[in-house]
Image (cartoon, rainbow, N blue to C red):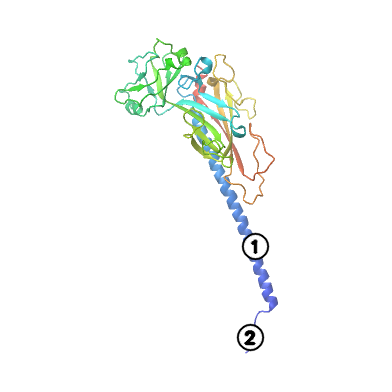
Amino acid sequence: MLRRAFTLLELLIALAIGTFVVGALYSLFTVQLKQFVYQDLQMEMHQNVRLGLDILSRTGRTAGLGTVGWVSGALGTGGGDNTILPAVISYDGTGPNGSDAITIVSQDPNLIMITDPDSLRKCNDTSIMFDLERPGYTDRIGELSANEMLLCSDLSNPTHKTSLMWVLQSDGDASTGQATVNDGTTNYADYLDNCPLGENMPTAMQCSRGDIITFYIDADDTDGVGAGSAEHPVLMMDLDFESPDEDDVPVVDDVEDMQIQYCFYGSDCSSTDSSGWVNSVDSYSDSNTRNDPDDLYMIRFTLVVRSSRSDPNRIYPGAPLAVGNNSPSATPDHYYRQVNSTEVSVRNMRVLSWL
């Protein structure tokens, strides 16, 4: 019986075809894997930039709520009109690689209460009274905690608006409607300018917890503060208006740069260039300069978000971008980046400009 088998030539041809097919499949797999990694990094950056801009825009819209564009008392710098606390404080290019920072002052919109007009207080009194017969006030007063801020604005005088802030000395008393505060007249010259010793506090004030929120970039892991590092910069949130410390909150990972611009009353806020936008807000003064915080109309936030890891194949060059104060780099680091901006109408400040 004759038996037939493959010849050596046929085996070599089959081996060559098989090698070609396997090689083609491997190349296809490699391309798909690279594309998957790229898409995963792009989606990660897209989610980070959206989250960061959403948090910044929601906080930016509340700027100045319950203030008159500035606040006297706690956290002011201690004397006179030029040293009171503006509702928006800008820090232009003070962060890593020239990143900006911003402090936003406002009332907590969920805890707003009106003081009891039957309980008139002197400027140096240490208690603020609220009428418990008003709906929801018992619960709201109970939400106030010691060492938080109580921020109140005058509702009674249309010609001389003031905003005053104290440090709460104890939790709000839901049984009496009392909030116990420090004596502003003994500590703050700017407080005395607006509530002189011996005079009465405004007869009607809108009060709430004072929120003072600072956003900044942390890209330093050598200071022992914050979650950021040069490899993984982080957008941070500071809730106590102090220098960066261990209780600051990480908001979004891999935010390499934040740039902030401001548009004021009388400027062209629709312009895309710098003609209507500036990089900083003046400290409050009576000189009514163009960039006073109570004339602020809009804030433009720009974030540069970097991928969490560099291109594993070291093919994509990548380098820091020239955005605002951040200078470009000619040295490739192989990171992917996305840049996005949003413009926020600061509604509370727009109302103040007409007062």
Label 1–label 2 contact, CB within 8 A: no
Q: How many marks?
A: 2
Query: Residue shown at 65%/67% (left/top)?
Result: 19
Q: Amino acid at mark 2?
A: Arg
Q: Amino acid at mark 1?
A: Ala
> In the visual, does 201 lie left or right of 27?
left
> Closer to the N terminus: mark 1 or mark 2?
2
Residue 118 % position (x, y): 32, 15
Query: Residue shown at 59%/17% (left/top)?
Result: 289
> 326 or 94, which is in the foreground?
94
- Which residue is the site of mark 1? 24
Residue 111 % position (x, y): 39, 27
- Position above or below: 333 against 166: below
> 215 or 19, which is in the foreground?
215
User: Can residue 158 be spotted in the picture?
Assistant: no
Residue 10, picture quadrant: bottom right
The disc placed on residue 203 is none
> 101 or 169, which is in the foreground?
169
**Residue at the extreme top of the image, as rendered:** 198
Residue 333 % position (x, y): 65, 44
> Tag 2's secondary structure?
loop
- Position above or below: 188 against 98: above
- Which residue is the site of mark 2? 3
